Amino acid sequence: MFSTNSPDSSPSSLRSQLASKTIKDGGIIKVVTLGDRSAGKTALIIRFIENNFRVATPPTIGASFLSKSSLLPPSCSIHVKFQVWDTSGDDRFSSMAPLYFGSADVVLVVYDVTDRNSFNRVDEWVKMINSSDSSSSKQVVIVATKVDLSSDREVTQKEGNEYAFKMGYSHYETSARTGENINEMFDDIANEEVHRKAMVRQNSNLSEATKLTTGSRSTVWGNSDATIKKNASHTGEEDSSIFSCNAGEIVASNCIVM
């Protein structure tokens, strides 16, 4: 991943890279972390944003905000901006969590592999997400932290994998100390989100094409050639190829090539 926080990421270097290739705008990706206090959320985010590890981080009060711009691999031809909200795991602030993840694209549910209680609470956080009106539009990722502390591990990788699989979510085991899997996780998250938004735009364009078509002729998108022939009979011509071509152009103009 090339980011504005990497060693060769000065403004001039970024401009040079952008100028040397066609860069597509992947937009803004809002990411929110949820999880118990001391689960390692802040260390995880600091490693991603600053490529740095802090041995001790003060407890988050309410929420903190950080951002980072990246070019996504493998082609590095898509630019995204991460807006990351790191929420407090303190019970005093748990009622505020929906205020942050309500408009999020991605929610990271974080637990500490050396603390079984934090893993047991994952399902509570997931239920909170699923109870929100916008839950179906969110990408939820289960994130294990502190995997470098193997001798202190209380939660196995298998347990994390099985829970995530049961819920239909991705699962990553990470270490803020070593950086293990953190950039890879955010790359995967961003590529998935860019693809999802491209599909939403594509479906929206198809819907608009259908509306425009049905406004001038009695057919709908997806009807058979026989129906198209019937509805075009007053002209004496079959225009299904023109119809398909126009719709295809609408879709192609909004496709994001991964």
Image (cartoon, rainbow, N blue to C red):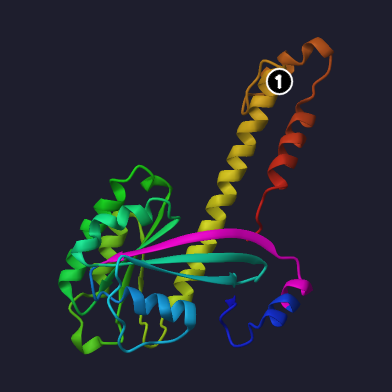
Whether residue 41 is situated above or below residue 162 in the rendered picture:
below
Whether residue 232 is situated above or below residue 10 in the rendered picture:
above
Magenta residue span:
17-35
Mark 1 residue element: helix
Q: Residue at x 26, y 87 (%)?
A: 149
Q: Residue at the front extreme?
A: 61
Percent position of residue 127, x then y: 24, 52
Left of 184 or right of it: where is 143?
Answer: left
Left of 193 or right of it: where is 218?
Answer: right
In this orientation, which residue lies closer to the viewer: 154 or 2? 2
Q: Residue at x 64, y 28 (%)?
A: 210
Left of 177 or right of it: where is 198?
Answer: right
Residue highlighted by disc 1: 228
Percent position of residue 180, x then y: 41, 82
Q: Residue at the right extreme?
A: 236
Check residue 19 for magenta coloring. Answer: yes
Percent position of residue 96, x then y: 28, 56
Whether residue 217 is situated above or below residue 207 in the rendered picture:
above
Total of numbered circles in the picture? 1
User: Toward which corner of the image does residue 109 lie, by quadrant?
Assistant: bottom left
User: Toward which corner of the image does residue 230 lie, by quadrant?
Assistant: top right
**Amino acid type indicated by mark 1:** Ile
Decide if residue 181 is in sight here.
no
In this orientation, which residue lies closer to the viewer: 106 or 230? 106
